Image: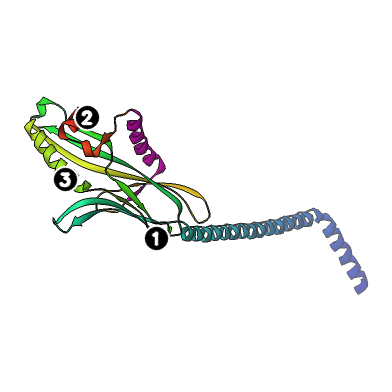
Amino acid sequence: MTLISKKTENDRHLKKWLIDNKIYFETIAAALLALMALIVAIQANKITKYQTDLVVKQTELIELQTNIELQQVLPQFVIQAIQIMNPSTGYAEDDELSIKNVGGLVKELHSKTAIFLNVELYYEDPRKGDPINKSIPINGYYAATEYNAQGQGQVLTLVGYKNNKCASDLKKIFTEFAKNNEMYGFLNLDRYLRLNYKDMLGKSHIAYFHVPLIYGARSLDPSEGEVRFNEHNDAVRNNTLLSFDDLTPEIIFNAVK
C-alpha cells in the first residue's frame, strides 16, 4: 500500500468517525453555546444590578442634598419657659414663654397656648377614698404676646403678670387646704404651644410643643398635640374653662371632685 492510499484510507475512517459521532459534537457545541449564553446573562444581570444600585445611590444623594437644603430653609425654634427675677423682691415672679428662631426666615407666625393645671389629691387614710389625679384646662396664665416682625431671633415672647408668683402661692394654699381636709394636695402646670407659620418657600406648617418650666421644649407628634388642644377647646365650648386669676383651692377642689 502506497503512502497516498494509506492517507486516503485514514481520511475515510476519520470522516466516518466524525459522521458517527456527529451527535456528540453537536451536543457539546450546543452545551458550550448555552454555557456562554448563561455567562453572558449573568454578567448582564451584574451590570444591570450595578446600574440599579448606582441609580439608587444617586437618588439617595439627591434626597440628602434636598433635605439639607430644606433644613437650611426651614425655621428652627428654640422654646423655653423662663422664670424672670424681680430684683426688688429677689423672687422669680414672672414666667415667660420664649420662642426664638435660629433657622430660616419664618413668615406669618401665630401662636396658641393650652395650659393645664394638674391636680393630685391623696387621702391621709387611703381607706377614705381613691387618689384623684386630674388635668384642668385654664386660661389667662399668659397675659400678652410680644412679636418680632424680623422673622428670626426672638420672634415671640408670651408674658404674664406675676404669674409664677401667683402659681407658687396657689400651690402653698392648696396644700394647706388639702391638709385641712385630711388629704395631701399637689399642683403642677403643663404648658403646650402650637405654632402656625410659613417657611421661606411659602409652605405652611403646624408644630406642637410641650414646654416644662426651665427645661427646653419637647416637640410633639401632631396627633399628640391635637389631643391636648382639643381638650382645651372642648373646655371652651362646654364653658368649663377656668380663669387662672380666679383660681382658689375651693374652685380647684370642686372641679376635680
Q: Residues within 10 Å of mark 1 (few under 14, many from 20)?
A: some
Residue 65 falls left or right of residue 118: right
Residue 176 forms part of the magenta stretch = no
Given the image, on which type of amino acid does mark 2 rest?
Ala
Q: Main secondary structure of the magenta part?
A: helix
Q: Secondary structure at mark 2?
A: helix
Residue 222 forms part of the magenta stretch = yes
At 64% from the left and 60% from the top, the residue drawn is 47
Can residue 2 be seen in the rendering of this structure?
no
- Of all residues, the one furthest to the bottom in this rendering is 3
Residue 57 place in picture, x, y as percent: 56, 60
Between disc 1 and disc 3, the foreground one is 3
Question: Mark 2 highlights which residue?
Answer: 255
Quote the CA–CA distance across marks 2 and 1: 41 Å
Question: Mark 3 highlights which residue?
Answer: 168
Marker count (numbered): 3
Q: Nearer the viewer, residue 127 or 190?
A: 190
Given the image, on which type of amino acid does mark 3 rest?
Ser
At 15% from the left and 41% from the top, the residue drawn is 171
Q: Give whichever of discs 2 and 1 has the lower sequence position.
A: 1
Residue 243 place in picture, x, y as percent: 26, 36
What mark, if any, has residue 102 been given in the picture? 1
Q: Secondary structure at mark 3?
A: helix
Given the image, on which type of amino acid does mark 1 rest?
Val
Residue 239 falls left or right of residue 177: right
Quote the CA–CA distance across marks 3 and 2: 19 Å
Q: Give whichever of discs 3 and 2 has the lower sequence position.
A: 3
In the displayed structure, would residue 184 be above or below residue 51?
above
Please provide the residue range marked out in magenta: 217-238
Residue 5 falls left or right of residue 237: right
Quote the CA–CA distance across marks 1 and 3: 32 Å
In the displayed structure, would residue 241 be above or below residue 38?
above
